[in-house]
Image (cartoon, rainbow, N blue to C red):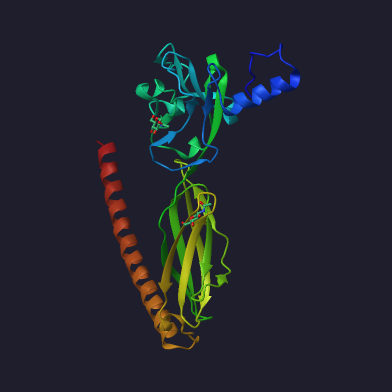
Amino acid sequence: MFSRRNGHQSLPRSLSVLVYLLLQTHSCKGQSQLIAPSQPIVATVGDDIILPCHLKPEADVVAMTLEWTRPDLNHIFIHVRRSGQELLRSKHPSYKGRTSVSIDELKHGNVSLKLSKVKPSDAGRYQCYIPKLDTGSVIELIVGAASSLVISLSGLDLNKGAVVLQCASSGWYPEPEVFWLDGEGNLLSAGPTETVRGTDDLYTVSSRVTVEKRHSNSFTCRVQQNHINQSRETKIHVPDDFFEVQSSSSSTTVGLAVSLAVCILVILILGFFVWKFSKSEISRSSLSNRFYTEQ
Ligand SMILES: *[C@@H]1O[C@H](CO)[C@@H](O)[C@H](O)[C@H]1NC(C)=O
Ligand SMILES: *[C@@H]1O[C@H](CO)[C@@H](O)[C@H](O)[C@H]1NC(C)=O
């Protein structure tokens, strides 16, 4: 990826390849290389993190040009140092005030970048690069956020004797999956998960499931994001009497019908009085209007 300019033309070709390979592993003077971990860095939204990158063998790079860029975003500049100073002009606005390198560490060839208050949009590949040494390395940042969840009773299906449960959780990144399990750990089939992405890029998910009475009446909602290896779950126990089937002639239905009728009656009486009152108000105000216009 990073070409080396010093050739070994005087040596036979096979020997020069060997020397080159040796240089790759045991770099000697003038052949320092930037090294970054091959494992991605996993961060949680809001964290302050270090993107590690260091020169091997170490050398003082305080005065050298150093560029941190994002190769997957058209090499936008994250942090640039020239002549011993940070160059703020070319820095991408999204990273303003959030990046730093340690001068003490630069003296030892450690060009690790500190990134504060990680955002979902920070996820991606980062490259540290020193043009003078023509060496660079790439590191991946994975950003995630997980959050607790709440199960609530969202309704009763009186005809079937079933209960509708709702599970909701906000503050996830990337978008998580939602599962419902019964007391024995069997997957339940639920309606489609509703997902909303907030202005902060975090996801809010909610899912409903209709359950009927079973052996243990205990139900678990699990919200899971495999990419960041995070999952949260909550269990709810629904009491037996929530599942009772109500026949149409039952006292509850009659009671409901009576209270509905009373309600309608009250609204009608209230409406009548409001109408009467506003009518007398209008006639009074129109009278006074006429009084003024005739003046
Ligand atoms: C490099 O510097 C960072 C701080 O900028 C520090 O956290 C890290 O431990 C240093 N790495 C090495 C290998 O010294
Ligand atoms: C995910 O987390 C579990 C425990 O929380 C751990 O045992 C496992 O190794 C992790 N997997 C990955 C890929 O990080």
Residue in the foreground of this view, choosing between 198 and 65? 65
Left or right of 71 on screen, residue 15 = right
Q: Is residue 149 above or below residue 60?
A: below
Q: Write the residue at 42% across / 77% down.
A: 238
Q: Could you tell me which quadrant the N terminus lies in?
A: top right
x and y, in percent, of residue 178 in the image: 52, 60
**Quadrant of the rendered image holding ligand 1:** top left
Residue in the foreground of this view, choosing between 252 and 155? 155
Q: Could you tell me which quadrant the C terminus lies in?
A: top left
Q: Write the residue at 33% across / 70% down.
A: 269
Left or right of 277 on screen, residue 194 = right
Q: Is residue 124 visible?
A: no
Residue in the foreground of this view, choosing between 137 and 217? 137
Residue 291 falls in which quadrant of the image?
top left
x and y, in percent, of residue 246 in the image: 47, 85
Seen as rendered, the residue at the extreme right is 13
Q: Is residue 46 above or below residue 86?
A: below
x and y, in percent, of residue 113 in the image: 43, 29
Q: Write the residue at 28% across / 42% down.
A: 289
x and y, in percent, of residue 46 in the image: 39, 41
Q: Write the residue at 53% across / 17% down.
A: 29
Q: Is residue 30 visible?
A: yes
Residue in the foreground of this view, choosing between 268 and 16? 16
Tag count in the figure?
0
